[in-house]
Amino acid sequence: MAEAAMAERGKYYWGVKVPDTLSDSREILLHADEVLVTDGGTLAFILNAVEGSPRQVTLALAPGQWFAYFAASVLDGHACGVEHWPIETE
């Protein structure tokens, strides 16, 4: 069951810092298998191919619509392995 859910949603939990025009909390949390930053600055979260279906982009943000991305804790959404992050307190 857990493996099937991971295959549908992605293995990893990510956070993205975005402008308040995209999210009141200035953050988006999501599951994906991979993260890709294109040469043009687009941030794309990708779900790997599952048997019988192609890879999928689950979220893409244009340049200027994101500030940072990070591996997020599934417990509280905070950045993993980061003790202090000044942007978190602003």
Image (tube, rainbow, N blue to C red):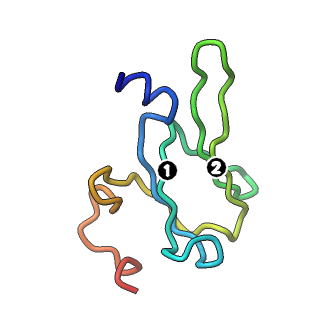
- Name which quarter of the figure residue 22 lies in: bottom right
Q: Earlier in the sequence, mark 1 or mark 2?
A: 1
Above or below, 9 against 19 in this view is above
Would you call the spot at circle 1 few (<14 residues within 10 Å), some (14-19), or many (20 or more)? Answer: some
Return the mark for residue 49.
Answer: none
- Identify the residue at image location x=48%, y=26%: 7
Above or below, 74 against 27 in this view is above
Does residue 4 appear to the left or right of 18 in the view shown? left
- Identify the residue at image location x=43%, y=57%: 70
**Front residue (pair 61, 75):** 75
- Name which quarter of the figure residue 41 lies in: bottom right
Where disc 1 sits, the SS reads: strand
Q: x and y percent of residue 14 in the render?
A: 45, 51
Mark 1–mark 2 Cα distance, whole angstroms, equals 9 Å
Residue contact between numbered discs 1 and 2, judged by CB atoms under 8 Å: yes
Q: x and y percent of residue 63 in the render?
A: 71, 65
Which residue lies under the disc numbered 1? 30
Does residue 62 appear to the left or right of 1 in the view shown? right
Q: Which corner quadrant holds the C terminus? A: bottom left
Would you call the spot at circle 2 few (<14 residues within 10 Å), some (14-19), or many (20 or more)? Answer: some
Which residue lies under the disc numbered 2? 59
Q: x and y percent of residue 28 in the render?
A: 51, 61
- Identify the residue at image location x=30%, y=55%: 80
- Name which quarter of the figure residue 3 lies in: top left
**Front residue (pair 87, 25):** 25
